[in-house]
Image: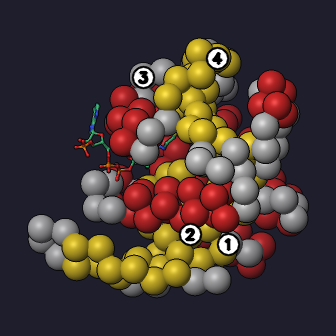
């Protein structure tokens, strides 16, 4: 269901539309996913590692498979009918089985084009995610973030996410990287 919101910025006013991504949108999702991942991590690995990662995870075939999974929830944030960010969440305990202790929802990806950082788009998507989780009686929401991605960590802290004390390897191609798991318990 589309959600409309007007976010006020010092410089301008934007209307942000959140809409569910369908398989028909896979080309747009692939382009956005590639661009945002590249911008975020290009300086943290080799060009070959980056290309390997983008080919493996953000090709349209792989993304179509994910979008066809009924357990996948994937949304664009659009400004002027153009996707400028996306959100992807799922109830999935495979990456950290201890989460099975609770009814838990994993935020798998939240990526905003860099020219739209700091403009309330990420907040709109996070609010949408948390509203979904609360409405569907989840006890905890969780996600992983690169240990050196301080901007994202600060963003999550503002929402009350805290470190779980667990981490995992998240290699980009042949470049090893460490991500930390963070979580936020929801009031029942
Ligand atoms: C993470 C992301 C979704 C957050 O959205 P955003 O619009 O940038 O978020 P905000 O601007 O509201 O919040 C970021 C905070 O980090 C702060 N910040 C900016 N650069 C920073 C840095 N280098 N180190 C630490 N904090 C930083 C900002 O000042 C802001 O805090 P404030 O509101 O107290 O001033 C967005 O930056 C993004 O898409 N990044 C690239 C993809 C990504 O990293 N996704 C998350 C993967 S886990």
Q: How many numbered tags mark residues here?
A: 4
User: Mark 1–mark 3 contact, CB under 8 Å?
Assistant: no
Q: Earlier in the sequence, mark 2 or mark 4?
A: 2
Q: Who's the residue at 56% across and 69% down the image?
A: 76
Q: Who's the residue at 50% across and 56% down the image?
A: 126
Q: Earlier in the sequence, mark 3 or mark 2?
A: 2
Left or right: 148 with respect to 31? left
Circle 4: is it few (<14), some (14-19), or many (20+) Cα within 10 Å? few
Mark seen at residue 148: 3
Left or right: 91 with respect to 33? right
Front residue of 86/33: it is 86
Circle 2: is it few (<14), some (14-19), or many (20+) Cα within 10 Å? many
Q: Where in the figure is residue 60, as x and y percent of width and height?
A: 75, 60
Q: Secondary structure at mark 1?
A: loop
Q: Who's the residue at 66% across and 74% down the image?
A: 20
Q: Earlier in the sequence, mark 3 or mark 4?
A: 3
Q: Earlier in the sequence, mark 2 or mark 1?
A: 1
- To which residue does mark 1 refer? 21
- To which residue does mark 4 refer? 166
Give the Cα separation between the discs numbered 3 and 4.
15 Å
- To which residue does mark 2 refer? 76
| Number of the front mark, 3 or 4 | 4
């Amino acid at each position: 269901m589309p959600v409309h919101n007007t976010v006020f910025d010092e410089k301008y006013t934007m209307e942000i539309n959140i809409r569910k991504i369908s398989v028909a949108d896979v080309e747009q999702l692939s382009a956005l996913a590639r661009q945002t991942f590249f911008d975020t991590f290009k300086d943290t690995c080799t060009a070959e590692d980056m290309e390997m990662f983008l080919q493996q995870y953000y090709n349209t075939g792989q993304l179509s498979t994910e979008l066809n999974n009924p357990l996948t929830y994937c949304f664009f944030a659009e400004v002027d009918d153009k996707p400028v960010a996306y959100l992807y969440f799922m109830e999935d305990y495979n990456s950290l089985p201890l989460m099975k202790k609770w009814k838990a929802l994993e935020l798998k990806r939240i990526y905003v084009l860099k020219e739209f950082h700091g403009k309330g788009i990420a907040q709109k998507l996070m609010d949408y995610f948390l509203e979904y989780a609360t409405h569907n009686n989840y006890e905890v929401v969780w996600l992983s973030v690169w240990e050196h991605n301080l901007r994202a960590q600060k963003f999550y802290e503002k929402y009350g996410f805290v470190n779980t004390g667990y981490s995992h390897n998240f290699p980009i191609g042949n470049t090893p990287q460490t991500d930390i798991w963070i979580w936020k318990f929801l009031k029942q």
